[in-house]
Amino acid sequence: MTTAQRPTLEAVARRAGVSRATVSRVVNGSTTVAGPIQEAVRRAVAELGYVPNLAARSLVTQRTDSVALVMPEEATRVFSDDQVFPGIIRGAAQELEAADKQLVLMLAGSPAGHARVERYTTGRHVDGVLFASLHGADPLPGKLARLGIPVVCSGRPLGGVAVPYVDVDHVGGVSGAVRHLITNGRRRIATIAGPQDMVAGIERLTGYRNTIAEAGLPERVAYGDFTRESGARAMHQLLDEHPDLDAVFAASDLMAHAALRTLREAGRRVPQDVAVIGFDDIETAAYTDPPLTTVRQPIVELGRALTRQLLRMTAGEAIDEALILPTELVLRESA
């Protein structure tokens, strides 16, 4: 019994009636071959089921046709019930699939993981790098950019790093949420802020503080890390320190979920005694008790926009330094 041989470049050339070099140029994406000849080669490739050698193609084109999505988080966080991470991954995967490119997901939640990502990306194993969930002034995006590797970040990089980024309007979204509370007569408005080593946490707290100051109201702030557990701790702290509060803006829906439960356990009615607003509009926000008013951010579109910007860079196109997507206040029964 013999095993069928894989179609070769020479077989494609014979079928298309062209030289082996012409087939190689077409397969490797050259634009120097006339349209009718390209079509003949592609037809021969499809008829024979020829599969290009990706390693050889990379040597010729200096491209890998893959993009790294780097998340400086532990795997348990990325694959938790926080839908922000899966949303970014889904959006990036959709754009790359349409562009016939591969997604390489890399977690950098530890020093060893961060070092591994640095070795892989600086080794030019991918054509470009997307960064999501950056903490602090991570030097890696700037280092890759200086090496000429296309980089786009989800959120403005901290530390003055000049790297293109895509984000949502955190400040405007939170300002609209807090103004809604004020318009509805709330005057003792607290916030459960996000981590202050992440731009989302910083800007959502800025939106709260700006709007509270404009209204001449006092701040009431406790800090979390976008998780349910931290939301519960922060809500307990706020109730201890400000038992008269009448509204809470939580910088993530998961923290808002925990705040709802903590308030219920403390005998506070929502929204009669305390109104609650979150941020993200994750799927479960509509099914809490009561359903959660929240700021919707277009998270899948964020992943897609990140990827589109990076693909433009890898194609040699100029892009804007910053692309900001709009947010929307979604009104439900909690506020």
Image (cartoon, helix red, strand yellow):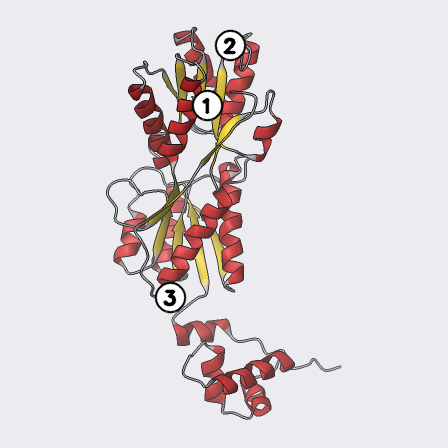
Disc 1 versus disc 2: distance between alpha carbons?
22 Å
Residue 332, horizontal then vertical, whole percent: 56, 25
Tell which tag, 1 or 2, sits nearer the viewer: 2
Residue 35, horizontal then vertical, whole percent: 48, 84
Residue 288, horizontal then vertical, whole percent: 60, 24
Q: Which mark is on residue 273?
A: 2
For label 2, the SS is loop
| Residue at the right extreme, as displayed | 1
**Quadrant of residue 121 within the rendered picture:** bottom left
For label 1, the SS is helix
The residue shown at (45%, 11%) is: 246
Q: Residues within 10 Å of mark 2 (few under 14, many from 20)?
A: some
Tell which tag, 3 or 1, sits nearer the viewer: 3
Q: Which amino acid does label 3 sit on?
A: Ala
Q: Which mark is on residue 74?
A: none
For label 3, the SS is loop
Dot 1 or dot 2: first in sequence order is 1
Name the residue that disc number 1 marks. 230
Q: Is residue 120 visible?
A: no
Name the residue that disc number 3 marks. 315
